[in-house]
Amino acid sequence: MSEAKPAPAVPSTGAVTSGGAATPSAVTGRPSAPPESVPVPVLPPPAVQAERLIGLGVHEIAGLSAAELRGAAREAGATAPAGALLALHPDRAPASVLAPLLRHRDKPGFVVSDMTDVDLFAPLALVEPPEGPVYLLTGPDRGDRLADWSPDEVLPHLAAHGRTPFTLTEGIHWVLQRPAVLERNHCFMTIGSRLRKANGALDARTPAIWISNGTGRDGRERRDAPKVGWCWAGNRHTWLGFASAEARTGP
């Protein structure tokens, strides 16, 4: 990763079943991390989320009028289940432009200095967003139970359980709507976005969103700021979950 880790959470002891026993992953055989200590904030209806994005000027970034975004949100939300996340297609609102809109303790978000290619991290084929500028993600989850797993381990696990990993811009949208989703020792990766090399192979970096310690190249003034960075696909971190959804749906 591009920065020293914050103080780690309690080491993983295994997923907790209804009987309270630890159980290994069916995919990897490794125990998963314990469930989250604090419930993730529930999202408001898509129409309310649209107003939040309009207030931040995201509709202008995406080349939409306020009326167009409101209409798309209203259409998408007509049959959406409660708690769905409203997102704009990454082609309309790239990560490099959205990241500075993030806030944590009044500190603006930023992209790490060694990720100048952040907007080249595109959705994997299996998580391609619906066509159109606006869509919804149902059943968003921060994936705290998967902390201390690697991205390489988590991707097939999510697929086996009928879930789809968040892309980077989807993760940013989530934090824009509910900043409290990002908390120390319970931040998350967005492994639905990857960078492909010229030869077609995947770059080993996987995007993540966490809270800066203000160390190294971040600078002391950025302590507590929301941070878009990366981790190696084969590494594990006790304080990073894996954001995922049940499905993506268009208007």
Image (cartoon, grey):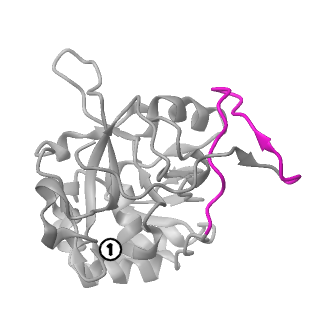
Q: Is residue 23 magenta?
A: yes
- The residue wearing badge 1 is 69
Q: Residue at x 39, y 32 (%)?
A: 125
Q: Which residues are magenta?
A: 18-37
> Relative to 31, is 202 on the left or the right?
left
Residue 196 location (% of width, % of height): 24, 27
Q: Is residue 227 magenta?
A: no
* Magenta segment, prevailing SS (helix, strand or loop): loop
Q: Quadrant of residue 121?
A: top left
Residue 214 location (% of width, % of height): 20, 64
Observer able to see residue 62: no
> Relative to 204, is 154 on the left or the right?
right
Q: In this view of the protein, which residue sits in the foreground, 242 or 159?
A: 242
Residue 223 location (% of width, % of height): 23, 70
Q: Is residue 18 above or below residue 194?
A: below
Residue 207 location (% of width, % of height): 32, 45
Q: Residue at x 53, y 30 (%)?
A: 153
Q: Residue at x 44, y 83 (%)?
A: 48
Q: State the residue lying farthest toward the right.
A: 19
